[in-house]
Each structure stands twice: as C-alpha cells, then as structure tokens.
Image (cartoon, grey):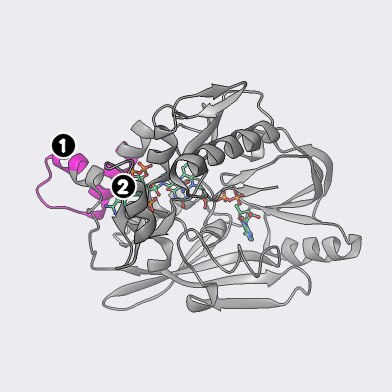
C-alpha cells in the first residue's frame, strides 16, 4: 500500500513529555519499502524532516514545521551463533524493552541492565543508551541506515558509530543525515554480570536468590526503576533531562572546598563523573514546581510535565536549573534530551 502523509498532526501522543506540537506532515513507516518512498518525498518537497521513534528523548519547544517520519519497522532475526555469541538483527521500530525481554527469554546476555528503557531499538545508538553500568555499545555489532539526502544504504560498524557517554556520530557530525532501519547486536551466551551499582546489589539481596541469572538482574532493574522514575503514561517526562558531567579532578577539588560531601565516580585517573541530580537537589530544585512543570521529587535529573506544560516552559525551567548549578558549582550542565 502507498505511504500516507497526514497533514497537521498533533504529536501529543507521540512524545513521552506529552507536549502538544503540530507536525506539518506525518507518515508512519511500517514497511521497508516505505523508507525509500518517504525519503524520495522529503527530497522532492525540500522540507525539513524529523525521524521519530517512541518520542522518549525529545522536547518539542515549538510546532514541527517538518515532515515527521515515525519508524514502525518490526522484527527480530537470529543471524548466526557460535559457542560464545548470538548475532541478532533487529528492526528499528521494535520497542527496546520488548527486545530486552526477548533476549532474556532466550538467555542471550548483555542487555539485562538496560531493562525498561522506553523507546525504540533504532534510537538506541543515537545516544548509546546506558544504565546501571552498561551501555549498548558493549553489545552493538552494526547499524544499518539509509542516507536521507541520497537514499544510499550504509552499514556502520561499531567503531564507525563513535559511541561515547550518551553520544554518537548520529548526534554529532551525522546529525539528521540518516534513517536507521536496523541494529545488529552481538549478545553473550555466557553472561558477565554487572551488579556494581549499589541499588542493584541491594535489590538482589532482597530477592534471596540461589543462582544469579540475567532474568534476576532484569527484575531487579525493573523494580528499582519502577520505584524511582515517573511513568510517562502518568507524568510526562523524557528520563534524565541532563547528562552527568565529567570534570577534571581540579574542578572536583575546588567544589570539595565548599561541599565536602559531593559524590563522584572516577572515569580515569584525571577525570570524575559527578551526578547532576545531586547538584540540582543541592541548589534547591528537587521537587520544585513552576507552573505546569517541575523537577521530579524522587529524581532531580528528571523534569516533568504536570499536564498542559509547553515545551518552551520546560526549556525555560531547564535553563533556570542550569544557571543555579553553574553559580554554585561552576559546572555547565548539558541537556541530554534532543530539543526541537
Ligand atoms: P526518540 O525520542 O523518538 O528520538 C530520539 C532521537 O533519535 C531523535 O533525535 C530522533 O530524531 C532520533 N531517532 C529516533 N529513531 C531514529 C531512527 N530510526 N533513525 C534515525 N534517527 C532516529 N536513556 C538512557 O540512555 N538510559 C536510560 O536509562 C533511560 N531511561 C529513561 C527513562 C524514562 C522514564 C524515559 C522517558 C526516558 C529514558 N531514557 C533513557 C531516554 C530514552 O528512552 C532513550 O534515549 C531512547 O533510546 C529514545 O528512544 P526513542 O525511540 O523514544 O527516541
Ligand atoms: P543513581 O543510582 O541514583 O545514581 C546517580 C548517578 O550516579 C547515575 O546517574 C550514575 O551515572 C552515577 N552512578 C551511580 N552509581 C555509580 C557507580 N557505581 N559507578 C559509576 N557511576 C555511578 O541513578 P538513577 O537516576 O537511579 O539511574 C540509574 C541508572 O539508570 C543510571 O545509570 C542512569 O544513567 C540510568 N537512567 C538514565 C536515564 C536517561 O534518561 N538517560 C533515565 C533514568 C535512569 P550514569 O548515569 O552515568 O550511570
């Protein structure tokens, strides 16, 4: 069937912040042939475009004067396996958490710490999604994408993707150039457990387990996340609004002269990561509400829409938080969420 483009579509239900923003044109890509058709249409109309997955990492601060292509390509395919690994090719529209559950059912290890992250598989390389000491870079094999300007297909190897802490080539120098169609993963048949994050070890203790498995880790992560993070179905949010800054040791030492309890995690011998949530809390923003939006009461990294907030209001709130952190700690927070 020919691809349908709808005009003036409200994206309210297509972003987890639950922000109303009108897309000039909107198409749901649920068949591989639609990708080329959609890109041809974008090129002919010479308009802006936005590729959208689950909308869980985006803030609309204005209407979307562009053609929005929503990725709804599904499918998980086992490519090959050997004694140690399975190689899996996943269509970009698959729900990330569905994929994690599929891996756990099949005893394929590597993504269990990344349980319950919202959004689609196709967006996972965009910011190299990470949680509880694991990043998707540890299981990424390749990314298949189509160039939006030329329709050329390309496979990016792991190193081509230039993945870093919540970063990739797709967020930087190749921003807006590619429609990711599939992601290839290399998963482990013999699990290596990552339980060094304090909360996971505590949760596993409560579960009184005999023999640890990836299923237990997934269950522990799901329990912690459900108790701490606001459910976007109930309270609009996009997860962590800011990145945790990585700073030089000298910056840490300067902060310790006025805040000796500041937490930090070594990254290498010269740099440390400081939890942005701690600094936001200690400048007084945790749980604060401004109009229809605010800083979540349990997790200060998360900005929330109490209902009816505009993206502009949330963006303004984020600027106020960043200013106060800069004034007290001298650190410039960086937004993790993609702002349109
Ligand atoms: P979208 O928000 O739809 O898009 C994000 C960006 O990717 C946009 O720039 C978009 O243009 C681009 N994009 C999406 N799909 C494609 C594609 N197929 N091709 C090209 N470009 C594309 N993130 C973490 O890293 N760790 C967490 O633990 C985590 N927890 C979260 C918890 C909550 C409650 C929420 C709401 C969010 C959380 N996030 C977390 C953020 C978010 O879920 C992830 O970044 C997720 O990968 C975004 O997926 P999405 O499909 O919703 O992307
Ligand atoms: P938390 O456990 O309260 O810890 C606060 C921050 O300190 C984390 O963000 C984490 O940084 C860092 N941290 C904690 N223990 C660490 C350790 N042992 N080694 C290195 N760094 C450590 O965090 P939380 O808010 O409940 O989130 C738990 C995990 O889920 C984190 O990894 C977080 O990134 C992830 N998460 C991400 C999002 C998002 O939207 N990006 C949303 C919710 C949760 P890191 O963030 O660098 O891991």
Q: Is residue 151 above or below residue 73?
A: below
The range drawn in magenta is 202-223
Location of residue 236 by image quarter: top right
Looking at the rendered image, the quarter that the N terminus falls into is: bottom right
Query: Is label 1 or label 2 in front?
Result: 2
The dominant secondary structure in magenta is helix
Question: Residue 291's x, y, as percent?
Answer: 62, 21
Disc 1 to disc 2, C-alpha distance = 34 Å
Tell which of 293 and 215 is nearer to you: 293
Q: Kindly state the secondary structure of the residue where label 2 is placed.
A: helix
Answer with left or right where residue 112 lies relative to residue 333. left
Query: Reading the chain from its start, which is encountered first: label 1 or label 2?
Result: 1
| Residue drawn where x is 49% and y is 24% of the image | 288
Circle 2 residue: 256
Circle 1 residue: 206
Q: Is residue 244 above or below residue 134?
A: above
Work out whether residue 299 can be spotted. no
């Amino acid at each position: 069937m020919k691809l349908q483009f709808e005009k003036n579509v409200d994206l309210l239900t297509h972003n987890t912040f639950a922000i109303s923003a009108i897309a000039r044109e909107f198409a749901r890509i649920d068949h591989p042939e639609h990708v080329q058709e959609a890109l041809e249409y974008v090129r002919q109309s010479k308009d802006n475009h936005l590729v959208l997955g689950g909308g869980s990492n985006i803030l609309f601060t204005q209407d979307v004067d562009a053609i929005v292509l929503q990725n709804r390509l599904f499918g998980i395919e086992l490519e090959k396996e050997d004694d140690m690994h399975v190689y899996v090719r996943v269509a970009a529209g698959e729900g990330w958490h569905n994929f994690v559950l599929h891996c756990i059912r099949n005893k394929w290890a590597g993504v269990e710490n990344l349980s319950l992250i919202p959004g689609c598989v196709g967006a996972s390389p965009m910011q190299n999604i990470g949680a509880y000491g694991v990043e998707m870079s540890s299981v990424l094999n390749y990314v298949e994408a189509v160039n939006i300007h030329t329709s050329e297909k390309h496979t990016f190897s792991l190193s081509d993707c230039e993945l870093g802490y919540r970063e990739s080539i797709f967020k930087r120098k190749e921003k807006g150039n590619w429609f990711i169609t599939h992601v290839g993963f290399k998963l482990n048949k013999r699990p290596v457990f990552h339980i060094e994050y304090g909360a996971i070890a505590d949760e596993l203790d409560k579960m009184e387990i005999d023999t640890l498995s990836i299923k237990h880790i997934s269950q522990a992560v799901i329990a912690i996340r459900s108790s701490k993070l606001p459910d976007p179905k109930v309270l609009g949010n996009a997860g962590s609004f800011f990145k945790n800054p990585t700073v030089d040791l000298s910056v840490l030492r300067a902060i310790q002269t006025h805040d000796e309890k500041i937490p930090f995690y070594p990254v290498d011998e010269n740099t440390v990561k400081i939890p942005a949530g701690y600094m936001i809390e200690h400048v007084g923003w945790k749980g604060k509400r401004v109009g229809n939006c605010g800083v979540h009461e349990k997790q200060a990294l998360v900005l929330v829409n109490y209902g009816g907030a505009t993206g502009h209001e949330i963006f303004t709130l984020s600027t106020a938080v960043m200013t106060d952190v800069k004034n007290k700690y001298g650190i410039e927070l960086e937004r993790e969420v993609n702002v349109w």
